[in-house]
Image (cartoon, helix red, strand yellow):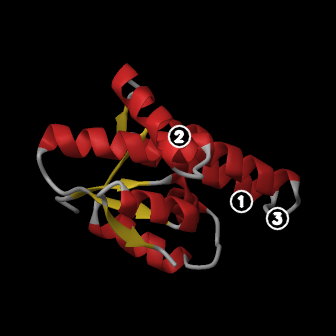
Amino acid sequence: MAEESAYFDTSVVVKRYVEEARSPQARGFMRRYRLLSSVLAPVETVSAVCRRHRAGELSLTDFDAILARLRTDRAHWELVELSPLIRRRAEKLLQQTALRALDALHIASALIVQEDSGTALPFVTADERQRTAAVGAGLRVLWVG
């Protein structure tokens, strides 16, 4: 079992459940590190899976299996609550970059956790715009790309 935590953006988490480009690489990072993410990640992941099911990309059987697996896995994830400090940091990032709101919240969450822990927390993403902003914010990025 992985000992070191890494912060996972939802762009990577979805690749664990849905076969996409670079899914094997994402799964490798998820085996190597304990998953730490925002409380937003489970909701975003369910949203992505539901979108794919509605689009006909996932059968009902696969859809149900993915949701069951997600519920089981989620019990092992460490999820960061959205605090006023995280919201303020995300707002600042939005003013400085071309990030989308949820991407800014993920970066802000990782930054606050990193500052609180005093360790360089790997930030795992498959989103290029987010990767650029995370590097600019001082995070050690592991790129799934």
Eye-nearest disc, 3 or 1: 3
Crowd class of label 3 (few under 14; some 14 to 19; many from 20; radius 10 Å): some
Eye-nearest disc, 2 or 3: 2
- Identify the disc placed on residue 124: none
Q: Mark 3 or mark 1: name the one nearer the start of the chain.
A: 3
Tell me: 1 left or right of 53: left
Q: Residue furthest front?
A: 96
Assign the N terminus to one quadrant of the image: bottom left
Q: Secondary structure at mark 2?
A: helix
- Which residue occupies the foreground of this view, 123 or 75? 123
Q: CA distance from mark 2 to mark 3?
A: 36 Å
Tag 3 residue = 57
Tag 1 residue = 62
Q: Residue at x 57, y 42 (%)?
A: 102
- Which residue occupies the foreground of this view, 53 or 51? 51
Task: Please provide percent x and percent y for residue 118.
Answer: 11, 46
Q: Secondary structure at mark 3?
A: loop
Eye-nearest disc, 2 or 1: 2
The amino acid at mark 2 is: Gln
The amino acid at mark 3 is: Glu
- Which residue occupies the foreground of this view, 105 or 40? 105
Tag 2 residue = 95
Q: Is residue 25 above or below residue 79?
A: below
Task: Please provide percent x and percent y for residue 25.
Answer: 46, 78
Task: Please provide percent x and percent y for residue 119.
Answer: 13, 52
The amino acid at mark 1 is: Asp
Q: CA distance from mark 3 to mark 1?
A: 10 Å
Crowd class of label 1 (few under 14; some 14 to 19; many from 20; radius 10 Å): some
Q: Mark 2 or mark 3: name the one nearer the start of the chain.
A: 3
Q: Residue furthest left?
A: 118
- The answer to whether residue 41 of the structure is visible from this angle is no
